[in-house]
Amino acid sequence: MATSRDDRHHAVLDRLRMPLPVLDSLACPHCGEPIGPAGNALRCTSGHSFDVAKEGYAGLLTGARPTGTADTADMVRDRQAFQEAGHYAPLAARVAEAAAPALAGGGLAADVGAGTGYYLSRVLDRSPDALGLGLDLSKYALRRAAKAHPRAGAAACDAWRGLPLRDGAVSVLLNVFAPRGADEFHRVLRPGGTLIVVTPGPDHLAELVAALGLVSVDARKEERLEDTLSARFERAGGEDVVSTMRLPRSDALTVAGMGPSARHLAPGELERRADALPEPVGVTASFRIGVYRAR
């Protein structure tokens, strides 16, 4: 579908914070047809229409209710504050390095469960010829992701219902602590494309798990990940990234608020438990980066 800036499409394209080649990579989540500007909205060739939020992201959700749980405004605010403090910078740097070979000649990096766009932005900083797309369910995250990088756009989607991308449109797919579906990942990746999956390591936040009542890492998580991906992908590399963070109590609370623990504890319980922590507290950051190639 043509995406030229004519009088009919000027308003929606100005509002949409997305490079035109990224827009051209999108597909209708209902029927899979291409999407382009139409008046004040986006529309596919079959006539399905989608709004563009005033914050600049494309609203491509389908269904009355999402199948997953979106991050709240407080969780997104905590995540961005923690990331901007640099605590996960070693992980972001290694993800960017892992993505760089597949983006050396350009291409699209898409982040499923992009959150604020932190990791996608680091990938694009490392690969100056690439473009990016952040996909997330949370409108609070998308408001930030849409502005995270000048070479990236953002779109609302429910990953469990499919990805609003054309077949083979993506060179690198990022999946950092987010839902994953091997069949959809394989569909949107170009032949031989790269999938980068980040999961918590066995000792991640170990010092806080008991002290703050956090959810511990499933011991079989890595095994289940390999089972999920093996039919569509072959492992091409990976590494463990481990560092020790010195966190003030406020940042210990922040990292707890970034994950699922923020949903199952009673209001005020995290703060009460954090009062017993030393100031600062040494906390292990442990991650596993898996690099896969589409079969």
Image (tube, rainbow, N blue to C red):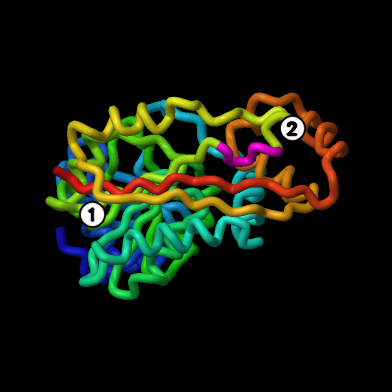
Spot the residue most to the bottom.
128
Pointer 2 residue: 212
Q: Amino acid at mark 1?
A: Val
Q: Which residue is found at the position 72% from the left and 55% from the top?
A: 246
Q: Is residue 205 magenta?
A: yes
> Badge 1: how crowded within 10 Å, few (<14), some, or many (20+)?
many
Q: Amino acid at mark 2?
A: Leu
Pointer 1 residue: 170
Image depth: mark 2 or mark 1 in front: 2
Q: Main secondary structure of the magenta part?
A: loop
Q: Using the rendered image of the protein, determine whether residue 59 is visible from the camera's viewpoint.
A: no
Q: Position of residue 147 (x, y in %)?
A: 49, 63
Q: Which residues are magenta?
A: 203-207
Q: Position of residue 170 (x, y in %)?
A: 23, 54
Mark 2–mark 1 distance (CA, rounded to whole Å): 39 Å
First in sequence: mark 2 vs mark 1: 1
Q: Which residue is found at the position 53% from the left and 57% from the top?
A: 144
| Image: 99 above or below 211 | below
| Image: 97 above or below 251 | below
Q: Which residue is found at the position 48% from the left and 27% from the top?
A: 219
| Image: 212 above or below 176 | above
